[in-house]
Amino acid sequence: MLWRFTIYLCVQLLGLAAGWRVAGPWGLAAGVVLASWLCWAWETWVGLSVLRWLRQEGDAASAPALHGLWGEACDRMRRLLRQREQQVAASDARLQEFLEALQASPNGVILLDARGHIEWCNQTAAQHFGLHTERDRMQSIGNLLREPAFSSYLVAGDYSHGVQLPGRESSATHPVTLSVQLHPYGDGRRLMLSRDITALEQAEAMRRDFVANVSHEIRTPLTVLVGFVETLQTLPLKEDERARYLGLMAQQAARMQHLVQDLLTLSRLEGSPPPGMSDWVPVSALLSHCEEEARALSAMLTRGQARPHQISFPGPVQARAAGQVAGIASELQSALANLVGNAVRYTPAGGCITVTWEVLAEGGARFAVRDTGPGLAPEHLPRITERFYRVDRSRSRDTGGTGLGLAIVKHVVQRHGAMLEISSVLGQGSVFAVHFPPARVRA
Ligand code: ADP
């Protein structure tokens, strides 16, 4: 302030001196007026330059470099501006972080304004509804999503529950289901969340099918059992008839027991951790167990028939040379025996069943069961390992099958990092093979 006053005084004195020198005593007044005008013009020019900077929304860096009163005012304004710039940058960064978080969400997120126009949407939502994240901004969601269920949901305004819509990529063979819900917020705005629930729906359908299948499988032998019990209770039967009925009842009870056992095995497999690499099972033990079971089953099934099965397994020397497999002995044993058992059960008497163990060049091994049974039509192959899937229901039941055998085999094989390969020619026979990876096989 003092500095400013000094300059003002100096200019006045200079004006006085110049006026005195040029025009004597009359020049004094003219000099003072001229000096004042000069000071005023200078102040106005400086003030205008500051105003121009502010009017141009100038940033802190482009502030005019001034001294004195204007300089200090400019400095303060520059500091305020810099603070505001920093605040704007910080809130921009935070907004960006929020949007990135929404972008990373596995669910679709759309922000709608009060008129239902898209303000922002993430990639997942764009994919769910076939939107373009940039091009469709500020477009009405009602115009872009024309699914009738969604239109009525949007109009009804009751957002306490969601709505299910077919996804954009949904087709008859690959249905895609989306769950969509709107959440009101702020000043009439709405947050629209979408979730792909296809897998959930499929799991639910599978659960329903599974329960229906299990109930059906248990109800059939139970009905037979109840019928026999009533017969035994109400009719005066001869001893041999009683014995026959009791035999049939025992058969049905065994069938239910077998089913429950398989169900327990499946649930145990699903709930237990994958087998480690520390336990090594000798292949010879697995093969001899399979052979024993196969021969006993074949003897039982072909009893009284002229031509039994021709069953061939690797010899003892060959079996010993097969080495070891890493895994859980009981699981491997039941899976491999199941494949051999199926070959015996489905191959008519006189047919051939050949079991081999082959050490592969890449280090892995292949267990294969070849039979000359009825074979499978190509359309059954993709579904044959599904639970309760049977090609010939009555034959499966006659031979004591539960329809869970191959599902258990597939589970065990996958848990051991191996692959189940099935090839079959209808009317000629099948090959069920398990391909073990090199890491699980040692000589
Ligand atoms: P099941 O207990 O009925 O045998 P699986 O899961 O073991 O159930 O087998 C499913 C179906 O696959 C069987 O019902 C049968 O139709 C068919 N299948 C399995 N193994 C063979 C085979 N070696 N030859 C022909 N069909 C087979």
Image: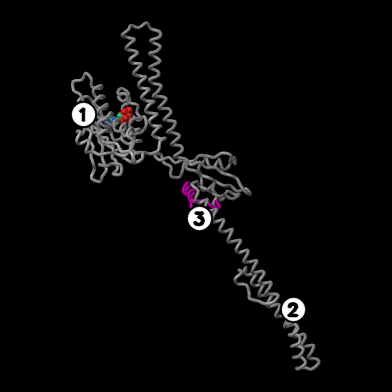
User: CA gap, disc 3 to disc 1?
Assistant: 68 Å
Q: Tell me which numbered mark, 3 or 2, is placed earlier along the sequence.
A: 2
The residue segment tinted magenta is: 118-138
Residue denoted by label 3: 134
Picture coordinates of residue 387, whole percent (x, y): 37, 31
Residue shown at 81% from the left, 92% from the top: 25
Query: Residue 246 location, x and y as percent?
Result: 34, 13
Q: In the image, what residue type sits under mark 1?
A: Ile
Sequence-earlier tag: 3 or 1: 3
In the rendered image, which quarter contains the N terminus? bottom right
Q: Is residue 43 above or below residue 342?
A: below
Q: Residues within 10 Å of mark 2 (few under 14, many from 20)?
A: few
Q: Quadrant of residue 30?
A: bottom right
The residue to which callout 2 is attached is: 2
Task: Classify residue 402 as left or right of residue 163.
Answer: left
The numbered mark at residue 410 is none
> Looking at the picture, which amino acid does disc 2 mark?
Leu
Q: Residues within 10 Å of mark 1 (few under 14, many from 20)?
A: some
